[in-house]
Image (spheres, rainbow, N blue to C red):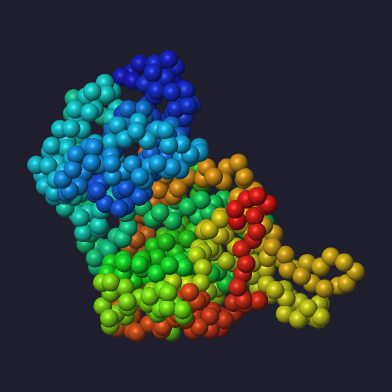
Amino acid sequence: MAEMNGGAAMDKEALLKRVGSEKKLHRVDSCPFLKDHLTVVVIGASGDLAKKKTYPSLFALWKSHFLPEKIKIVGYARSKMSDADLRDRLRPFLVGAKSVHGRTDSQVEDFLEHCVYRSGGYEEAEAWKGVNEDLNEIEANSGMLECNRLFYFAVPPNVFAPAASAIKDNCWNLEGGREGWKRVIMEKPFGTDLSSFESLSQHLSSVFQEEEMYRIDHYLGKEMVANLLYVRFANIMFEPLWNRHYIKSVTITFKEDIGTYGRGGYFDKVGIVRDVMQNHLLQVMSIVAMEAPVRLAGERFDEFIRDEKVKVLECVDAIRPEEVVLGQYTASRDGSEPGYLEDEGVPKDSNCPTFATLVMWIRNQRWEGVPFILKAGKALNERKAEVRIQFHAAAAGEFLFPSAGELVRNELVFRMQPNEAIYMKANMKQPGLGDKITVSELDMTYRNAFPDDFDKLPDAYTRLILEVLRGKHAAFVREDELRVSWKIFTPLLEKLESQKPTSYVFGTRGPKESDELISKLGFRYHGGFYKYLKSIPGKVG
């Protein structure tokens, strides 16, 4: 575990003094940044994203000994407030915040002592020069030569370009002979179409190197999405089946049981396709459909993964308008939930879709003829996100088991929320003296399979921030991935601008036309709604 500092090997005692605890000492190999100084600058610190996601995720890492002992977190925004004001704003979101290794509230005040605040315009050079002076003073006081800086953009995308230029010009260079990496985290959306993406990307690429940028799609930080790669490539039983010869369809679903609730003014400028499909669901689809990367660990593994995702996205055919269903929710049947057009800020003649089902076809040898069905919506009958792989019907099943009728098709399901699970639907003999066929669900619900670890599962943002600190890019979106995704969706979005969506009632499955389209593609529901699997006694399911 010898580390180099100015050419001299650092012994364990010196390294322990530097990292601050035995727990961190044991993590230096996998988290080398722990031995260095770290300053995090949260741009947009007064906003919702920062207080609800960024700071709680940093707190979870800090409590779990995944951040340097003397970290400093500098909040920056236009709002005028003091360090104490910032801490008062953050405190309600940190009390009870989830740690990677359990829950505790006692460390909130200790963590907040590491949080300070500076105000200024996002493009204001003098303000950023002042921040840079603060950072240099913080780093000088640390007594370390290795000092890293992480800039987290928790701001709207229209601020990305001016803030990026101001930071690079005024807040990028270390002083006093100190060295270290500088990295930038940015949150979607990255444009609204191909043209706006290219404009933003061209500017950011002129400011930062690709390896310095980490574009967050928080779905890539979800436990079950990360697990897709492991299930696919660590289990030989799936590889022979993972193709058009055995798989009938792949359905990727995102359902919310709530409406826009006061966010309609923002949502109306985006719509469900831009908000969920072009990013979250497409990223999941690329992982399901990609070929095996050169390697999943070691040197350049993250680039190999992203290479394969780009390759499969390049094979996606143009989306056919006749294979798209758009919907917009109306008030619930009992009138307790308002319709979308009743939300404050939504134009009364809005055509913005709150629901969409669309079909993608991947033109390659593995997936030719297999529909990838993406479905997303708000104000539906349940909250759920899943990947459902439905296999072909059993060959000659109706002849081998004539009394059973149409056999239920095998399915492999990855449930991302709620209550993460992997399960498979399989036909088998019902116990007893008869010969009746029944359907069983071979279940690996995370809460049941890993009862000691389930409550310790990190939040997606917590996982992703740690990956940035480790310098790993696999769970982040590369520029060429975004370019291909906008090439896929922009023509469709242009055609749908004036199309009036079909109405559906708040709390239902969505437009019936969606189910009709999916049925035409060969998907079989086999009994309507799918039940969630029950948890073991005493556990919340």
Above or below: residue 458 compared with residue 177: below
Residue at image coords 65%, 76%: 527
Above or below: residue 97 compared with residue 252: above
Residue positioned most to the left: 126
Residue at image coords 69%, 59%: 442
In which image quadrant can residue 273 be found? bottom left
In which image quadrant can residue 388 be found? bottom right
Give x and y (percent) for residue 513.
49, 84
Give x and y (percent) for residue 78.
16, 49
**Can residue 343 be seen in the rendering of this structure?**
yes
**Can residue 183 be seen in the rendering of this structure?**
no
What is the number of callouts on the image? 0
Relative placement, left or right, of 433 versus 106 is right
Above or below: residue 403 compared with residue 167: below
Give x and y (percent) for residue 6.
31, 19
The foreground one among 176 and 209 is: 176
The foreground one among 540 and 77 is: 540
The foreground one among 339 and 336 is: 336
Residue positioned most to the right: 433
Relative placement, left or right, of 527 versus 435 is left
Give x and y (percent) for residue 424.
66, 62
Residue at image coords 11%, 47%: 124
Above or below: residue 267 compared with residue 306: below
Image quarter of the C terminus: bottom right
Residue at image coords 31%, 70%: 264
